[in-house]
């Protein structure tokens, strides 16, 4: 949707997708992500329980803060708007 | 929703709001804006007719590209997600 040297914006659609067992995202850029529709559970490695996200929920993820998607709603697409930035 | 030195993210709600007659936004930062819900008409100074935006529409606005909001839906709130960046 947008990409320049400082910012990249992506629309991501999850259809019941979850991160593979044991997989963690570990990103060089910070990310700000909004759930536009659907629902998800996002787990940070240093937190015991996942965060419950629904339409309108957003999370700021520092660079290299390890996280994974534990669940997305299997009944409807979960649409994310992700902003990656430095 | 987010602010650092490179990026600022804002949620804006327009309830039938339009820019005052003769007013143009003229911003130092570039902006990427998404209509999350509702509908709007966004006019650029160098374009004869406004762009029709509805839920899911997005526009990239270069710094200092003059623009104005000519119309937002009077019947429901128009929710914008605006990302300002360098």
Image (spheres, coloured by chain):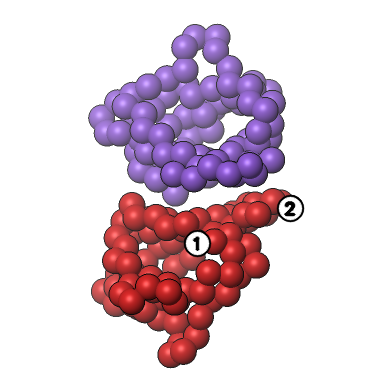
Chain colours: A red, B purple
A6 relative position to B80: left or right: right
Residues marked 1 and 2 touching at CB (< 8 Å) = no
**In this view, B49 is above or below B12:** above
In the image, farthest residue toward the bottom: A21
Please, what secondary structure does the residue beneath circle 1 have?
A: strand
In the depicted view, which residue is nearer to us: B13 or B60?
B13
Residue plotted at (36% across, 29% down): B14
Residue of label 2: A5
Residue of label 1: A61
State which quarter of the image contains the C terminus of chain B.
top right
Chain of the residue under label 1: A
Q: Position of residue A70 (x, y in %)?
A: 36, 79
Kindly indicate the quadrant of the structure image that contains residue B37.
Answer: top left
Badge 1 local density, few (<14 within 10 Å), some, or many (20+)? some
**In this view, A76 is above or below B22:** below
Q: Are marks 1 and 2 on the same chain?
A: yes
């Amino acid at each position: 949707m947008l990409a320049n040297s400082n910012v990249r914006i992506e629309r991501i659609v999850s259809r019941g997708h979850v991160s593979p067992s044991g997989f963690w995202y570990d990103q060089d850029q910070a990310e700000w992500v909004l759930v536009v529709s659907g629902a998800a559970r996002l787990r940070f490695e240093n937190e015991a329980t996942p965060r419950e996200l629904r339409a309108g929920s957003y999370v700021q993820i520092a660079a290299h803060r390890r996280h994974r998607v534990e669940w997305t709603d299997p009944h409807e697409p979960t649409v994310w708007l992700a902003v990656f930035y430095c």
